[in-house]
Amino acid sequence: MYPMSIDTPRYGVVDRDYAMQLAAASPGEDGPVWMVNLMKYRQMADYADGRETTISGRDADDIYAPLKSLATVGAEIVFVGDVDQQLLGDNTTWDRIAVVKYPTRRSFIAMQTLPEFQESHKHKDAGMDQTIVMGCQPLTVPSTSDLRFTDWSNVPHPSTDVDGPVAALHVLQFDNMESETQTPTYMQSCQSVVARVALKHGLRISGWFYVEGTIVGDQRRWNQVRFNLFPSKAAFLAFDSDPDRLQAQKVHCTQTIGDIYTMIVRPTINRLDESVQI
């Protein structure tokens, strides 16, 4: 069904069961899917055909960028950003984050069969050291409009030319899941208290998602991906060290999270919110 280099890439393990779910989605039940990509690059590109090259892994991925293939299937890039700082997680340090919205699950699979995509994929394989690609659906966010439209004109650390908006990205695995599509009850009370503290630092929810499947990864199961926007890195760090946040987390967030990545990302493209609302 797929070319060998795509079906068995060097940069991760393909979940064939989830791939079959995507391919078999019936037209009546199919719909948009947001593919969230965590990317770690090789220092230098390494082509499987052994060619000599002096370009970096990031440069090879930039050559790969399948814009024509995405357009052919009606997909659009709704978020791209470089990781400024990784705060929580294992020894994998991610370099770039991207989110692509596909009009249907089947369109994601259809793109893999396009000749131009298959031809360009060798550059991704050469440049990518490791990746996690999660198929996601929008998650209901706390029911207050303030969390999407926070006024940044009067916050302690506003955006500047040197320190512009950042996304605090959280990739979460919960210990106890009551429902795949909802946040565990113990986290709901925690997040509502912490969000009130974050509002004074300019929190805007850019997009929260639940993970329906991980098409490429390291065989870990993830539950949610959250993009929280702040007016500056200084604003996020002020929130992160705010005594009220620390106290609220100590009192209300007593149960552990199974696994997590938290990182500060500098967006160059961010249309997450509008991609969910449309």
Image (tube, helix red, strand yellow):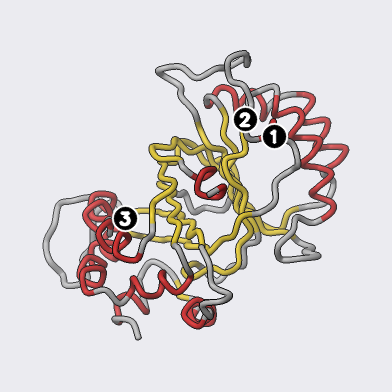
Give the alpha-carbon distance from disc 3 to disc 2, as whole Å.
38 Å
Q: Residue at (35%, 71%) from the top-left corner?
A: 10
Eye-nearest disc, 1 or 3: 1
Give the alpha-carbon distance from disc 1 to disc 2, as whole Å.
6 Å
Callout 1 crowding tier (Cα within 10 Å): few <14, some 14–19, many ≥20: few
Left or right of residue 240, residue 158 in this image? left
Q: What residue type is labelled 2?
A: Phe
Q: Residue at (67%, 30%) from the top-left corner?
A: 240
Mark 2 highlights which residue?
149
Q: Residue at (23%, 49%) from the top-left corner?
A: 59
Eye-nearest disc, 3 or 2: 2
Left or right of residue 276, residue 161 in this image? left
Callout 2 crowding tier (Cα within 10 Å): few <14, some 14–19, many ≥20: few
Give the alpha-carbon distance from disc 1 to disc 3, as whole Å.
41 Å
Q: Which amino acid does label 1 sit on?
A: Ser
The image quarter in which residue 209 lies: bottom right
Tell me: residue 102, above or below residue 92. Answer: below
Q: What element carries label 3?
A: loop
Q: Residue at (27%, 56%) from the top-left corner?
A: 67
Q: Of residues 221 and 68, which is closer to you in this image?
A: 68
Q: Which amino acid does label 3 sit on?
A: Arg
Mark 1 highlights which residue?
145
The residue lying furthest to the left in this view is: 52
Number of labels in the image equals 3
Q: Quadrant of the N terminus?
A: bottom left
Q: Is mark 1 on a helix, strand or loop?
A: helix
Mark 3 highlights which residue?
42
Tell me: residue 145, above or below residue 130. Answer: above
